[in-house]
């Protein structure tokens, strides 16, 4: 079986392990699904994307280099530069359109969003984040998309991370959630604009990703 044949079915693991809000003290609108997908198959698809659109450290509007390396697939990609944050049809590094979103990625994300209560999720953008030891993502809101009634589905591959979630204001208290390989977290409705971030990645080794963590965030950007 070749890779394109393999990528027709979403790579879901059968699991009813959706954390009830109360059980892990998650804010309303956040769904956490452990052991949600086959990360090995997903990583193969990610690797085909980053062969065409290499991971790179983007610049922030303030002029610093992001510690997380990024790429995208889908019709739109999230980019950061001196000029600000935006979604672009073109990869500024290659001058080409971003690679198409592999069916395996899209269908896995839509199936997980469906389990979290969003049956019509149709992402047009997938941001790929790669963390090496020490890389982090500061508290932020995702607000470059046009329609905040659409959720974001986030999938974790490789090394574990401490994910922090706060409130609607930057200074609100945060709580920490462990995101492990194969975990999915879906942010929608009341949670869509919560501040969140990722603590500096602890050094380690993972069989799939060696010394890194890969995070995929699927969005409706249009
Ligand atoms: C990460 N995730 O897990 C970064 N954004 O590496 C995010 O920034 C994120 O997990 C929006 C919704 C869910 C997320
Ligand atoms: Fe985010």
Image: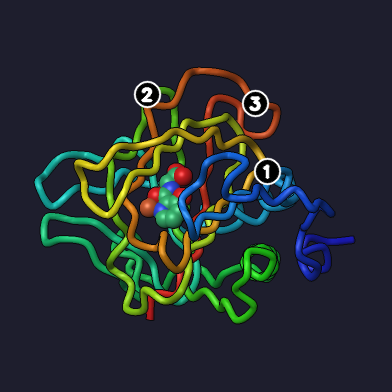
Q: What residue is drawn where x is 11% and y is 44%?
A: 63
Between 68 and 219, the one lying in front of the other is: 219
Q: Which of marks 1 and 3 is in front?
A: 1
Say whether residue 195 is visible: yes
* Extreme residue toward the front, this view: 22
Say whether residue 43 is visible: no
User: Residue 61 vs residue 101: left or right?
Assistant: left
Q: Residue 206 carries which label?
A: 3
Measuring from the top left, give residue 23's x and y in whole percent: 62, 41
- Quarter in which the C terminus is drawn: bottom left
Give the secondary structure at mark 1: loop
Q: What residue is drawn where x is 46% and y is 20%?
A: 202
Label 3: how many Cα within 10 Å (few below 14, some 14–19, many 20+)? some
Q: Mark 2 points at which residue?
A: 134
Lower sequence index among marks 1 and 3: 1
Q: What residue is drawn where x is 50% and y is 63%?
A: 218
Measuring from the top left, give residue 114's x and y in whole percent: 66, 70
Q: Could you tell me how far apart the alpha carbons at marks 1 and 2 are, in whole angstroms?
A: 21 Å
Q: In this view, does 143 lie above or below 134?
A: below
Measuring from the top left, give residue 92's x and y in whole percent: 29, 63
Q: What residue is drawn where x is 48% and y is 75%?
A: 124
Between 210 and 144, the one lying in front of the other is: 144
Between 107 and 102, the one lying in front of the other is: 107
Give the secondary structure at mark 3: loop
């Amino acid at each position: 079986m070749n890779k394109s044949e393999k990528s027709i079915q979403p790579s879901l693991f059968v699991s009813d392990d959706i954390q009830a809000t109360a059980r892990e003290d998650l804010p309303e609108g956040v769904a956490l699904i452990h052991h949600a997908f086959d990360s090995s198959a997903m990583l193969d698809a990610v690797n085909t994307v980053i062969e065409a659109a290499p991971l790179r450290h983007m610049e922030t509007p303030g002029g610093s280099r992001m510690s997380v390396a990024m790429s995208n697939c889908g019709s739109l990609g999230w980019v950061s530069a001196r000029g600000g944050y935006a979604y672009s049809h073109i990869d500024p590094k290659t001058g080409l359109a971003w690679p198409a979103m592999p069916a395996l990625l899209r269908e896995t994300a839509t199936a997980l969003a469906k389990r979290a209560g969003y049956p019509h999720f149709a992402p047009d953008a997938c941001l790929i984040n790669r963390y090496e030891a020490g890389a982090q993502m500061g508290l932020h809101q995702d607000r470059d998309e046009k329609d905040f009634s659409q959720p974001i589905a986030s999938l974790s591959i490789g090394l574990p991370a401490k994910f922090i979630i706060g409130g609607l204001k930057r200074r609100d208290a945060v709580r920490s959630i462990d995101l492990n390989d194969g975990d999915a977290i879906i942010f929608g409705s009341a949670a869509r604009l919560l501040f969140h971030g990722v603590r500096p990645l602890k050094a380690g080794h993972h069989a799939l990703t060696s010394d890194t963590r890969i995070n995929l965030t699927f969005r409706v950007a249009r």
